[in-house]
Amino acid sequence: MAQKPGIPKGTRDFSPVEMAKRNYIFDTIRDVYHLYGFQQIETPAMENLSTLMGKYGEEGDKLLFKIQNSGDYFKKLSDEELLSRDAAKLASKFCEKGLRYDLTVPFARFVVQHRDEITFPFKRYQIQPVWRADRPQKGRYREFFQCDADVVGSDSLLNEVELMQIVDEVFKRFGIRVSIKINNRKILTGIAEMIGHADKIVDITVAIDKLDKIGLENVNKELAEKGIPQEAIDQLQPVILLSGTNAEKLETLKTTLASTEVGLKGIEETQFILEALESMGLHNEIELDLTLARGLNYYTGGIFEVKALDVQIGSITGGGRYDNLTGVFGLSGVSGVGISFGADRIFDVLNQLDLYPKEAVHGTQLMFINFGDKEAACCLKMSAAMRKAGVRAELYPDSAKMKKQMTYANKKTIPFVALVGESEMAEGKMTLKNMESGEQELVSVDKAIASILG
RNA sequence: GUGAGCGUAGUUCAGUUGGUUAGAGCGUCAGUUUGUGGUUCUGAAUGUCGUGGGUUCGAGUCCCAUCGUUCACCCCA
C-alpha cells in the first residue's frame, strides 16, 4: 500500500453529511443571535503573537500555535541565543504571529483598533475556528469552532440576562437538555479575601472547580498542597459545600461574606441575574455553582458554563464578564460580557443523541436517469423548470448502466428518480419513481414538482 | 507537559505457548438483469502485518527505538 496521506492530529475533515449537520448547528446559533440584535464580524486566523501572549495565563501561552517567520531568521541570531536551547525564548525570536486561541481576545483587539467606527454598546457575534496546541482526546480537538456573542461598552446586567436567554433558546432549539451554571468572580474573590488569602484566588478556584470530579477530600488536599493553611481551608468548607436553592445559597453567602465588599457585590449581581431569568421562565435549569471557576483569568464578574445532561463531554458552552479586556490594548473603561458555544462538542452531543431534524440535510430531491444524449437534452430542460420551482434536482452526467445510476441515487439518499426515455419524451412527461416506496407513475413536470414539494 | 493502551485488506476485527502460502464479516468491482436501486445468487480484486533495528533455524506474535492513534491527568470548548 502506498503511503497514506493524513492530516495533523486533532484536526478533522468534514464529509458532506457532516457539513450539513454542522451548518444546521451554525445556522441555529446564528438565527438566535440575530434575534437578539447581534452583528457578525470575522477576524484573521493569525494574530500578532504580542496580541495573544499573556492573555490566557501561563498554560495558555504554551498552547498557542506559533507561526514561523519567513526568511533567514537564524542568521540574525547570536551564537549564544542559538545555543540556549530555550524553546520559548527562541520562538520569540523567529515567531511574530500565532493562530488565534479563542475569539474573545481577537475581538478585544478588534474593538480597540476600530473604536472610532464602533457604536457602543457593540453587540457582535463571530463563528470561526480556533487552534490550541493541546494533546487531543475525547471531545478535544486542536482545531475547533467557537460561536461567540459578546456585548462590549455596557455594564448593565441585562446583557448577562440576555445572553443566558440566548443559551437557553439555542439548546431548546437543539433539543439538548442542559444545566446552566452560573457563578461570579467577585464572589470567588470575596471568599479568598474572607479567609485572608486574596493572592491565592487562582489556586483556590482551580481546586474548588474539581469538587465533583475528585471529591472534597482531594480538593482539601490540593488546597493544602498549594500552601493554604488548615484554618483557612476549614473556613472554606461551608462555602464549598453550599447547597439548597439558588435563593438559599445567596442568603447563606450574604452572611458568610458579609465582611467583604466585593463578595457582597458579586452576590448582588448574581441575585439580579437569577431573579430576572426566573421571571422570564427558562426551559433549562440554571444553578448557582460556586465550584465553577473557569480558567480564563480575564473574567471579573459573572461566569457561565453549560453542561449537557445526557452526554458526558465537559462543558459545551462558556462565558463571562470581563471588565477590562480592552485595557491591555490601551482602551480602558470598556466592559464586556460574552458567551461561546463549542460547536464541535455540540456536534458530538447531537450525534450521540441523534437529534438532527430530517430537514437539516439539504440533499438532492430528484435525480434524472441519463439514457443518452437525446434523452439528456430533454432532462436538461425539465430539470431547469423544476429548479425554477425550487426542486433540488440533478441529472446523472453519464449514460451509465441503470443499476449504477440507481445505486448512486440510493447512496445519496435521493428520494425521487425521474426516468425519461423515448416514450416519456414523446409525451413530454417523466416516469417519477419514489425511491422509498418503489412506486412509480407517468406524470407531467408540474405534477412531479407538486408531488416532490408536496 | 505527564502517564497508560493500541497499530494486521477500503473498514471492523480474528490470528493458539513464536512454525509452512496471514483469514472472516461489511464495503468495493464484475456478472445474474439490453428501462429499475435499497432485499437474492455467482465470481473477483486488495495487505512490505505502521516504520527501523534486534533476539531466533524461524517473528504478525518476543525485545528496543521511532512515528501514528486512543484514553486519562494538567488545562480547556
Image: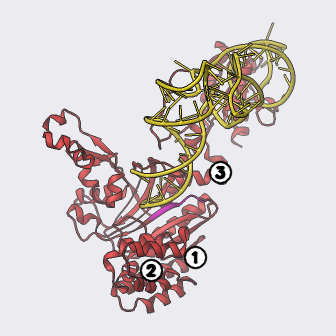
Tag 1 secondary structure: loop
Whether residue A111 is situated above or below residue A196 in the rendered picture: above
Let me know if marks 3 and 2 both belong to one chain. Answer: yes
Q: CA distance from mark 1 to mark 2?
A: 16 Å
Name the residue at 53% across, 81% down. A241
Residue B26 placement (x, y as % from top left): 74, 31
Tell me if residue A39 is in the magenta stretch. Answer: no
Q: Tag 1: Cα neighbours inside 10 Å, few (<14), some, or many (≥20)?
A: few
Which span of residues is magenta-colored? A312-318
**Residue A158 appears in the picture as rendered:** no
* x and y percentages locating residue A66 in the rendered image: 30, 45
Question: Which quadrant of the figure contains the N terminus of chain A?
Answer: top right
State the separation of the CA atoms marked 3 and 2: 36 Å
Instruction: Tell me the crowding category of disc 2: few under 14, some 14 to 19, or many 20 or more residues within 10 angstroms, Cα based.
Output: many
Q: Is residue A300 above or below residue A373?
A: below
Name the amino acid type tagged 3.
Answer: Pro
Mark 2 highlights which residue? A270
Please give left or right for residue A243 compared with residue B24 in the image: left
Identify residue type, mark 2.
Thr
In the rendered image of the structure, the colour used to display chain A is: red
Cβ–Cβ under 8 Å for marks 1 and 2: no
Name the foreground residue: A437 vs A76: A76
Give the labeled residue for mark 1.
A281
Residue A260 at x, y percent in the picture: 35, 88
**Which chain does the yellow colour mark?**
B
Find disc 3 in the rendering and name its residue.
Answer: A357
Give the chain of mark 1: A
Task: Look at 45% across and 75% down and name the residue there.
Answer: A183
The mark that comes first in sequence, 1 or 3, is 1
